[in-house]
Amino acid sequence: MFKRKLNIPIFDLTLNVIVADSIEEYTDKHNIEFSTTHAEAITFTHDNQFNVLFVSTDVDVIAHEVIHIKNMIFDHVHIKLDTGNDEFEAYLTGWLVKQIHGIINR
């Protein structure tokens, strides 16, 4: 298992990127519970921190979780999604995928 911090400078936020062999490995070690432990990844907040826990690091799983991360960030900073003006959302999504993929594949 490893954990790396990703600074998201535009929002002055940190995302913990965690890779583990199983969700159970993480929950047992940190004494927390999730509604499911059979997912390929899970995005969550804990102790006022943003976290993403990957069991599978396939690019489609990263992209899937990035949507959850982006929505969590938008909720946190009170940005409303706008399907008619989504350029910023698209840039943020691409940036997050690239950064997380880079962290995982160091």
Image (cartoon, rainbow, N blue to C red):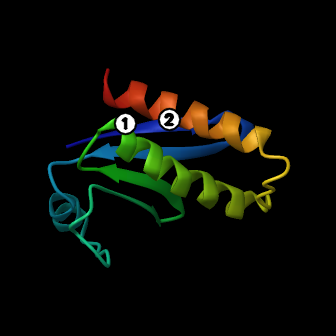
Q: Nearer the viewer, mark 2 or mark 1?
A: 1
Report which quarter residue 96 is drawn in. top right
At label 1, the amino acid type is Val
Q: CA distance from mark 2 to mark 1?
A: 8 Å
Q: How many tags in the picture?
A: 2
Where does label 2 land, which residue?
97
Decide which of 77, 63 is in the foreground and name it: 63
Q: Residue at x 47, y 65 (%)?
A: 47
Q: Residue at x 75, y 58 (%)?
A: 77
Where does label 1 land, which residue?
59
Q: Residue at x 27, y 55 (%)?
A: 40
Q: Quadrant of the N terminus?
A: top left
Q: Residues within 10 Å of mark 1 (few under 14, many from 20)?
A: few
Residue 8 in the image: state x and y as whole percent.
62, 38
The reply to whether callout 2 and callout 1 are in contact (CB within 8 Å) is yes
Q: Residue furthest front?
A: 84
At label 2, the amino acid type is Val
Q: Residues within 10 Å of mark 2 (few under 14, many from 20)?
A: many
Decide which of 32, 54 is in the foreground and name it: 54
Locate residue 90 relative to residue 61 in the image: left or right.
right
Residue 75 in the image: state x and y as whole percent.
69, 64
Q: Residue furthest right?
A: 85
- Dot 2 falls on a residue whose secondary structure is helix
- Dot 1 falls on a residue whose secondary structure is helix
Asked if residue 19 is positioned above or below residue 94 in the image, the reply reads below
